Image: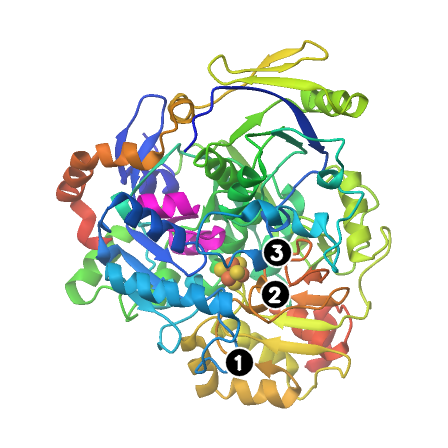
Amino acid sequence: MTPFKKLTSSAVPLPIEDVDTDQIIPARFLKAVTRDGFGENLFRDWRFDKDNQPKEDFVLNNPTYTGQILVAGANFGCGSSREHAAWAIGDFGFRVVVSSYFADIFSGNALNNGILPLVVSPTLLDEVFRTIEADPAAKFTVDLEAQTFKNETTGTVSTFNIDSYKKTCLINGYDDIDYLLSQSDLIEKFERERKDFSLT
Amino acid sequence: MAKTLFDKVWDAHVVTEIPGGNQVLYIDRHLIHEVTSPQAFNGLRRRGLPLLRKDRIVATADHNVPTIDQHLPIREPLGAKQVQMLTDNCKEFDVDLYGLGHPYQGIVHVIGPELGITRPGVTMVCGDSHTSTHGAFGAVAFGIGTSQVEQVMATQCLLLTKPKKMRINVEGDLARGVTAKDLILYVISQLGTGGGTGYFVEYAGSAVRALSMEGRMTVCNMSIEMGARGGLIAPDQTTFDYLAGREFSPRGQDWEAAVAYWKTLTTDADAHFDVEHTYRAEDITPMVTYGTNPGMGMGVKESIPVSSDIHGDASIQKAMKYMDLEAGKPLEQMPIDYVFIGSCTNSRIEDLRAVVGLIGDRKVADSVTAIVVPGSQQVSKQAIAEGLDKKLIAAGFQFREAGCSACLGMNEDKVPAGKYCVSTSNRNFEGRQGPGARTILASPLTAAAAAITGRVTDVRELLIEHV
Ligand code: SF4
């Protein structure tokens, strides 16, 4: 996993609520057996029409909007647990997704792939959308160590929450498996001592 | 301290707590399928790690499998490769596989319960969001991503923050023609697709207790559609009766001991929930969805809302555009093109019996393509033993072989662009049943009614006609 500490970038706005993982990566692209190349099909059916021609009104086809930050409406990533959604977002080049809240499984999948799901208040989310609308090149700074999110245009700095363990993982590029393996003695002890094991 | 059912099961599986509040949770049962496991097996190989507990993992092929001619090689090359890879991986890592051709093959959330792999008090995971289905037995069951599939393979544990607790009570009696599916679609329409985010839900109340195991599975299955991590129902005699004698259920003295333990798995009278909602069963009518997420549902007699606090007006407008429907208008009597009866929500034997019961001597409308896809080989076998397949075929349905099928449009079973499908599955997202497909979620009874009339229909009217 690539470590993540600090990032200043313009952002891509997607002011739609309840974006589900079937939109992020439709099921027919889940046939791959590796983690690579999903970015090509990110938001496939919003990006391309049925003849595979880019839909001009979709934001990812608009060269005005670029950057490593995706800003989306509430409840981003709901629906299917497919981690392919996080792989597609990462492979496309996003490191941060900003929303007022994320679906639980998506949020875990993102963190496990070095993508920061950054939760802001609904008011702040509106401000961010307005800033990008006024100036598509507007920059934002995400500082994971300080847990701050700065709108470089308005100067608004807000703090965000992240679980301290997950923060360490992201900064250092560790994943959970390393940690869990380090606990193997405790896991074995749990198995040995568990009373109702035969019942479960 | 008083505990909820969820606390009892979760807390019994905590190996250790780490600074920051995360817990290492031990996982009793791990189900895998072809779509979300290949990258996890690759990960194990890359790290040179063994599979820690072979006796706690079971595999099946369901998402990608064809539902016609399963004895022939899979025609679609990528799907075939994925299924083959599952077979190879299971062989290499010595995992029990109920693959194509195996009498136990089927949708992962159908086979777990019917084989007695699912049982009260266990923790269960699968790289699939509808793992919540297994909560119907009083298990803590939830979907995970592929990185977590790899973690469980390597360590039999996950690192998690304990979710908050919600209880949803439904009191009273469901009316005739109103099913478990309508109950859950109603609840989701009240809470919205994000209403359960961060929570694990316990379903309780007299209407829930009165449900069969199949009905309870339908309810728990759709917990994820309101954003909840999972849903569960306290085990009771209905649960024990269902599990008795199943392939992997305990027997003899072990069974007695297990039931004694399972009986302790209820929420204490004064246990605390972070949120509680109560609904009246009498308020629930047959439900249909009109939009592009499962929260956009309404009673079949109602009109599509013009605006909504839960979904936001912009979302409704976007959904109307995709569905080519008009807010303010009803859906009842609208012509439909397809009917899909299947998926881990409604493909069990009870669902098929209900459909056949409703149809009687009636036939599928000429304008409708109607397919029934049993959830597993065992469901299929049972349906054939009861003669349900013949009745369905005589009425004009196609009776397919087991798999996920048109629930997610990964195999060749898709709904064509622009067509309306009344579906017993769980998601009506844009393109879910195929690019451009328009899905109306409903119960098996409502779907069967639509197949007969060729229109969105209030099934209660057919029931009256039928007696
Ligand atoms: S039937 Fe549908 S929802 Fe259920 S496991 Fe298969 S694809 Fe997922």
B181 above or below B449? above
The amino acid on which the numbered mark 1 sits, given as a three-letter code, is Ile
Please state the chain letter of the residue tagged with numbered disc 3 in the rendered image.
Answer: B
Please state the chain letter of the residue tagged with numbered disc 1 in the rendered image.
Answer: B
Q: Earlier in the sequence, mark 1 or mark 2?
A: 1
Disc 2 crowd rating (10 Å Cα; few below 14, some 14-19, many 20+) is many
* Along the line of sight, the residue nearer the viewer: A144 or B467: A144
Q: Which residue is mark 2?
A: B424
Q: Which residue is mark 1?
A: B68
* Along the line of sight, the residue nearer the viewer: B165 or B169: B165
Is residue B37 visible in the rendered image? The answer is: no
Q: Residue at x 78, y 54 (%)?
A: B322
A160 above or below B315? above
Asked if marks 2 and 3 touch (Cβ < 8 Å), the reply is: no
Magenta span: B125-152
Local SS, label 1: loop
- Residue B435 percent location from the top left of the image: 69, 60
The amino acid on which the numbered mark 2 sits, given as a three-letter code, is Thr
CA–CA distance in space, label 3 to label 1 = 23 Å
